[in-house]
Image (cartoon, rainbow, N blue to C red):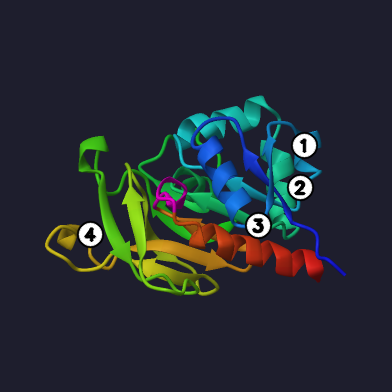
Amino acid sequence: MTQRQPVIGVLALQGDVREHMAMLGRAGASPRQVRRPAELSEVDAMVLPGGESTTMSRLLEVFELLDPLREQIGAGMPVFGSCAGMILLARQVLDGRPDQHQLDGLDIVVRRNAFGRQVDSFEADLEVSEIEDGPVHAVFIRAPWVEKAGASVEVLAKVPDTPKTRAAADRIVAVRQGPVLATAFHPELTGDERVHRLFVRMVGAQVDA
């Protein structure tokens, strides 16, 4: 029997929506844009794209998606967040706005804009657990990092110690907790779909179960 493609929604309120849609399609999923609660109920999993976390937080409330998305995550829906998506999934954010909403999908504390301003954006090759065939080329744009991870959180990648990254060496930049995956970098911008393939496998395993 042919397995169906998992239907994965991309939060389409702000950020790198088209880039994630393209990568999910290449990774073997059926991507859909999600802006309303009714659309959320029709997908197997969600991607929270890179963008501006405080804007996305506000728009989640405006579009009445905040509570439904929290409920779906709490019920075990697989979710992948990149950069701003990682911030939204964290239980606590440092250097965020006091009115910023969290989805509480990961037992992590993240620091917003941890690497600095836009001019401090950089790229690095990372060894990522669960990703085969060599390092992942990671693009960091006003990225967060994980200050603290709970006991149930699996650390997938840290910043390597190189002359260019020394100030941030050993900071956590990719994590997984059960069906929830997050990266501080933007795998949707590099053309390498291996992180998305990992997420599609996670979703497929849950759908099949």
Q: Residues within 10 Å of mark 3 (few under 14, many from 20)?
A: some
Q: Residues within 10 Å of mark 2 (few under 14, many from 20)?
A: some
- Residue 188 drawn in magenta: yes
Alpha carbon separation for disc pair 4 and 3: 34 Å
* Kind of element beneath mark 4: helix
Can you tell which of label 2 and label 4 is closer to the viewer?
A: 2
Q: Quadrant of the N terminus?
A: bottom right
* Kind of element beneath mark 3: loop
Q: Quadrant of the C terminus?
A: bottom right
Residue 168 numbered tag: 4
Q: Label 3 is placed on what type of residue?
A: Gly
| Percent coordinates x, y for residue 156 in the rendering | 44, 70
Alpha carbon separation for disc pair 2 and 1: 7 Å
Q: Label 4 is placed on what type of residue?
A: Ala
Alpha carbon separation for disc pair 2 and 4: 37 Å
Can you tell which of label 3 and label 1 is closer to the viewer?
A: 3
Q: Which residues are magenta?
A: 185-191
Marked residue nearer the N-terminal end (3 or 2): 3
Residue at 53%, 66% (x, y): give it: 176
Residue at 34%, 50% (x, y): give it: 139
- Residue 58 drawn in magenta: no
Residue highlighted by disc 3: 28
Residue at 57%, 65% (x, y): give it: 198
Marks 4 & 1, CB-CB < 8 Å contact: no
Res 173 → quadrant: bottom left
Alpha carbon separation for disc pair 3 and 2: 15 Å
Q: Label 2 is placed on what type of residue?
A: Val
Marks 2 & 1, CB-CB < 8 Å contact: yes
Marked residue nearer the N-terminal end (3 or 1): 3
Q: How many marks?
A: 4
Marks 2 & 4, CB-CB < 8 Å contact: no
